[in-house]
Every structure is written in C-alpha cells, then in structure tokens.
Amino acid sequence: MQDLKKAPIGIFDSGIGGLTVAKAVIDALPNEDIIYFGDTARVPYGIKSEETVRAYALQITNFLLKRGVKMILIACNTVSASAKEEIIQAAGEVPVLDVITAGTNNAVSLPDHKNIGVIGTMGTVNSRAYVEAIHAHDPTINVQQEACPLLVPLAEEGWIENEVAQKTLHYYLDAFDDSDIQSLILGCTHYPLFKDVIPKILKNGNIEIIDSAESIAESAKTKLAELDLLNTSGGDFQCFVSDRPQRFHELAERFLGRRLNGVEVVALD
Amino acid sequence: MQDLKKAPIGIFDSGIGGLTVAKAVIDALPNEDIIYFGDTARVPYGIKSEETVRAYALQITNFLLKRGVKMILIACNTVSASAKEEIIQAAGEVPVLDVITAGTNNAVSLPDHKNIGVIGTMGTVNSRAYVEAIHAHDPTINVQQEACPLLVPLAEEGWIENEVAQKTLHYYLDAFDDSDIQSLILGCTHYPLFKDVIPKILKNGNIEIIDSAESIAESAKTKLAELDLLNTSGGDFQCFVSDRPQRFHELAERFLGRRLNGVEVVALD
C-alpha cells in the first residue's frame, strides 16, 4: 500500500484568491506536498447559479482525487456555501475541510463571544452562509455582515495600503464603529492581504481578526495529526489553473507570498 | 416582404456594461426597437482566450440574427478587438458596428489630432486594439494608453463621484498630466458613467472626452440613414441575459439610465 502520509493536500478555489489558503497551509505545514487548482477560466463563481457552482466544484474535486490527494481544502467561500455536502460525498474517505466551517469554528471558540462581524463578497454575504454556520453553534450570537465588493479588485490591483484602499476600507468598516463586535471574520480568500491594514481602520483596536485561511490551515494540521497522516518529508507546491489570465504570475505570487514555479494549464470540461 | 425598417437593432456585450451603449442608442434613435443581449453568465470576457470569446460572440450573433435584427452593435471592447471579422462574416448583409471602430473614427476625425489618450481594462489595453485602429488611420498619431482596472468594479458599486472614485481616477489619470493628449477615448463600456467626473480630474480641462457609446450610437444613426432603414414608429427595449446576477436590476438601470422592464434569461449553450 502506498504511504498515504506522503500524498498531497488538494486545495482549490474559483481563482487565485485561494492561494492565500495555500500560503497559510505552507506556513503551518511546510513538509506537506500541495496541489492547488484555480478555476481561472470560469472565475468568478459568486455570480453563477448554485447548480453550476456544484458542477464545477465536482469536476475539480475529481481532478484532485485522481491525483491521489489525502485531504481536500475548499478555499472558496462560494463553493463552501453551496457545494460542501456534494464534495464530501464525492470525496468518500478523503476528508474535506472548508473555509466557512474553519473560520466559524475559530470565531465561536473564542471565549464569551456574543457579537461577530463578517465581511465578504456580495455573494457570500447574501448567501448568509456564515450567519447560518455561526447560529448552528449558538443561535444567540449576533452576526453583523458587511459586503465589501471592491476589496477583491483592490487586492488584484495590488492596492493594499494606499489612499484608495484606506478610504475604501473606511467606507465598509466604519459600519462596525457603533457595534460591539469582538471578532471580525475575513470571509473571502482575497481579504487576508488586508489583514495588517484592517486593524488600523477599525475604531475598536481590540477586535480579533479571524483569517479563515489561517483557520483552515490550522484545522488541516489538527485533522492530519488526528488521522496520523502528517508528512515529514514533502514540501512541493504544484499549481494548476484552467486558464492563464494576464498578470497571472505577478498576482499569484502576491497571494502566495512566495515564488511560484511551474504553473500548468489544464482543461476540465 | 417584411419592412426591414421596423426590425430591431441588436446590441450585445459580455455583461451589463453595454447598456451604456443601449442608453446612447435610445437617446440618439428613440424610435428604434432594440434587443440587448448581456452574457452575464460568462462575464468577464477580458480574461478568456480569443478562441472562447469568438465562440461566445458567434452564439450571441446567431441569437440576434434569429430575432431578425437589421443591424448589430458590438458593445464590448473585448469582442470588438478579437471577433469583429467573424461576426461581420456571420452577419452577412446585416451591418455590424463596433465600439472600437466607432470611438477611433470619432477621435481621428477631430482636427489636428496628434496625441490621443485611451483608457480601458487591462485586457483592452494589452490587446492594443485602439492603438492599431488609430494607427490604421494615421501611424504618426501618438497614442497613450492607461489601464484602469478598478473603474469597472467602482461603476458596479455605484461609486462614481465619492472620494474613493476621485482618488482612483487621480491614480490612473494623473498619468496624462504631462502628456499633450487632445482627446481621451473611454475605451470600456462601463466608463461613460464617469464621463462627468473625468474632466474635473484631468489637469488639462480642454481634453475632448470621446465616449465610445455615443460614438457608436452616432455611427448607427448615420449608417441606418444611409441604408434608408431608420424606424419612425418603434421604441421598444428588450433585454436578454444569460444569467440574472445579484443586484442585476439596480445595476442595469444605473447603466441604462432608465427603468428596465421584462428582462428574460436565456441559455445559449
């Protein structure tokens, strides 16, 4: 039998945003091999029907399973909200973790949490997926959601700390000025890029920032340890995309926080 | 024989941006019936391969031809840049106009023009379609292009004149401060929304703003008059989309500048 410990972890997203998850996993688990799939030809998923998102997510899941992954991380909030159950079923014995569950578990585990803020894309906010996940733990927790549609294009433009980024963050985050949120979940895989700026924008400096990329990386580490599947001799990173958009490399390296070698374009449909 | 004068004008775009073209056509030709198609399920085209863009554009062309349009307006810069010839061929005797040709013709027709600015998405700028179209008229004209990736999401967020929009416009347009451009082509169908703000941002207040939506509407009017195909008794507007994204109605009405009734979702593939 092949040593399952040495099998790669599969991570996927509708595009490049999930590379922040890959970065967090590399940081938390530097000895794991990772296969990343970004569906750059069909991004964005947030505006597509649930049926279409499920079909795409299952194609990617099968791609990862064929490559023998030992775990699948859904690094896409839209897929986490609408296709998690189907992916779990398709994956069989391969464990599946998702950013919404990971971020939520992290937030609700903080002591005496009664007010949680969530920022995300319009699609994620409207899906109420974080609200439902938090209320599944404790229906008395107040959840305040704010959609921040411009943060994705800002992140892709590389405008993280300039005046435009700061003004934009103020427009969105000032909505939390008069609320008593104790933590703020970054409910979009692009948002970890703003992690250092957001605390400077929030009026209340004590708000805990929940980075769902870090949360899922920690969950993955715990789960692999539980299953005795931690690798001690890997560390490869393989990146697959369904199309190579303009400026892909520059963008991908910004999200991944390191050099990216050998991206392969594969067609799924 | 059916009266071709009463046939509708077909207008299409990858999404809702082309509704600024529809608006300009309604303003210039209020007695024409219009069929608009926005490929909202597959937007954005700018990141897709030319082959894919051509295939999608031909599907939409066939959709419009089946509905008996007397003219097709390509209200999408990406399609204008990469699929115009194929659409002209598919359309046979039905005349086809496109935003790039219309905006370019408008700019180069201005007297003593030697320096032209172009703003557009990353895809349009990298395609150099405006540069080539301008140089086909006069290779001695200097063309300065600036990509303005954030203007599309700003327009969709409805941030047109607020501080974020103004700062963003400054970031992009200050590049023209030290150049001698006499006109600036708005090379993206979203940009007419910023038409009133842009002159306030530009250091040189005498720069002529070339709105390619208005340019193509004027070209359509001229062409229909030439062909004796002007309608005097129409005025209907029909809108078809391939998917109904969130906030579609609000967005579409902002771009169209009027109320929108009866949007129909149709699948092309």
Image: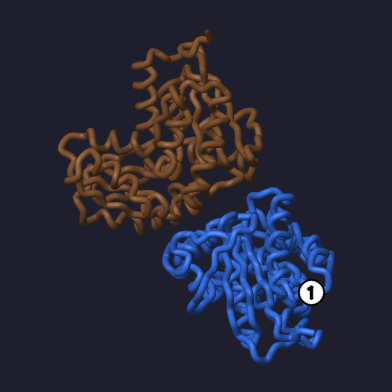
Chain colours: A blue, B brown
Quarter assignment of residue A116: bottom right
**Disc 1, SS:** loop
Q: Position of residue A47 (x, y in %)?
A: 63, 50
* Image position of A53 (left or right of A149): right
Residue A74 in sight here:
yes
Q: Which of A234/B167 is in front?
A: A234
Residue plotted at (54% across, 61% down):
A152
- For the N terminus of chain A, the image quarter is bottom right
Residue A203 in sight here:
no
Quarter assignment of residue A60: bottom right
* Image position of B251 (left or right of B229): right
Outermost residue, front side: A1
Outermost residue, bottom side: A232
Q: Which residue is mark 1?
A: A95
Q: Chain of mark 1?
A: A
Q: Which of B7/B231 is in front?
A: B7
Q: Which of A248/B57 is in front?
A: B57
Residue plotted at (65% across, 32% down):
B264
Number of dots carrying numbers: 1
Q: Position of residue B78 (x, y in %)?
A: 44, 45
Q: Position of residue A13 (x, y in %)?
A: 63, 64
Residue A26 vertical placement versus B210 (above, below): below
Q: Position of residue A212 (x, y in %)?
A: 67, 72
* Image position of B31 (left or right of A24): left
Residue plotted at (23% across, 38% down):
B137
**Amino acid at dot 1:** Pro
* Image position of B100 (left or right of A14): left
Residue plotted at (56% across, 65% down):
A16
Q: Which of B140/B236 is in front?
A: B140
- For the C terminus of chain A, the image quarter is bottom right
Crowd rating for badge 1 (residues with CA inside 10 Å; few <14, some 14–19, many 20+): some
